[in-house]
Image (tube, helix red, strand yellow):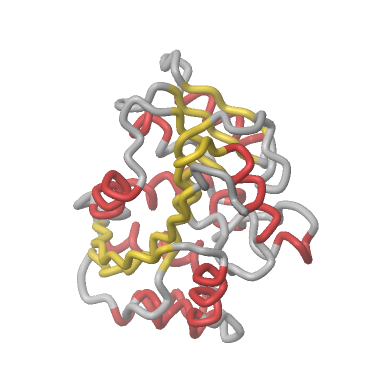
Amino acid sequence: MSRFDRSVRARGPIPSPNIWHWPHLYEVENRAQDVDGVVFGTLSEVADWRGRDVLDVGCGAGFHLPRFAAAARSVTGVEPHPPLVAAARERVAGLASVTVLPGSAEALPLPDACVDVVHARTAYFFGPGCGPGIVEAMRVLRPGGVLAIVDLDATVAPYGAWMRADLPHYDPAAVEAFFDAQGFTLRRVRTRWQFEDRATLRAVLGIEFSERIAQRAFTETPGVSLDVGYRIHTRVAPTGLVL
């Protein structure tokens, strides 16, 4: 889950146990996620990055950086966990338009008004408490730029039901209300995760959920694919004077 959850209370990034502890398995999960490209298809509609400067906040090992770099003018990844910074740099070593920097959502190592798109995927998972990160994202956006926050939609079964069972205090409605109050527009999308075999599926479930819920999820999944919902929250930086 998120590197930047509840940032006010945590006063900085908190560990993301899945990718921080099992980076190689998380790479497998990334390859399995959204095999039909629904999220990126929607992002291209609401936050077009072609010929523009992109910032990926919480870029992890840089899985999404090459995808942005294929059409963007420049791409910057920011990641707080040093081993992942190194992994991301290794991944994009041959891409001259991509830079990876250490840093946090609350203190982005970039100047004001320098990017056109800020992408944050499962990096503001809990909504309330992420205000400082949102303020920082808006600071680095040029007028008319877009902040796109992609997170998992816990209202969509079956994955969302497992999330709610594992995180009983997580309230999807409260998260949505938070982003709505912050001036975000919401798009919901449904995706398909596809795994090579059931052993891989079980391993990935094991880094996303507690052992009890992971076993439940595995038992309730008859094959090697999952239907998973996402929310894409977008907010546009003002283009004129705000009176």
Q: Residue at x 52, y 29 (%)?
A: 76
User: Which corner quadrant of the image does residue 4 belong to?
Assistant: bottom right
Q: Position of residue 71 (x, y in %)?
A: 30, 27
In the rendered view of the protein, which quadrant contains the C terminus? bottom right
Q: Does 233 appear above or below 168?
A: above
In the rendered view of the protein, which quadrant contains the N terminus? bottom right
Of residue 133 and residue 116, the one placed in the foreground of this image is: 116
Q: Residue at x 59, y 33 (%)?
A: 113
Q: Does 89 appear above or below 83?
A: above
Of residue 6 and residue 157, the one placed in the foreground of this image is: 6
Of residue 162 and residue 120, the one placed in the foreground of this image is: 120
Q: Does 50 appear above or below 133?
A: above
Q: Does 225 appear above or below 143?
A: below
User: Which corner quadrant of the image does residue 107 belong to?
Assistant: top right
Q: Position of residue 186 (x, y in %)?
A: 38, 66
Number of marks: 0
Q: Residue at x 39, y 60 (%)?
A: 232
> Horizontal placement of 231 versus 131: left or right?
left
Q: Residue at x 69, y 43 (%)?
A: 104
Q: Position of residue 120 (x, y in %)?
A: 50, 49
Of residue 117 and residue 36, the one placed in the foreground of this image is: 117
> Horizontal placement of 144 versus 134: left or right?
left
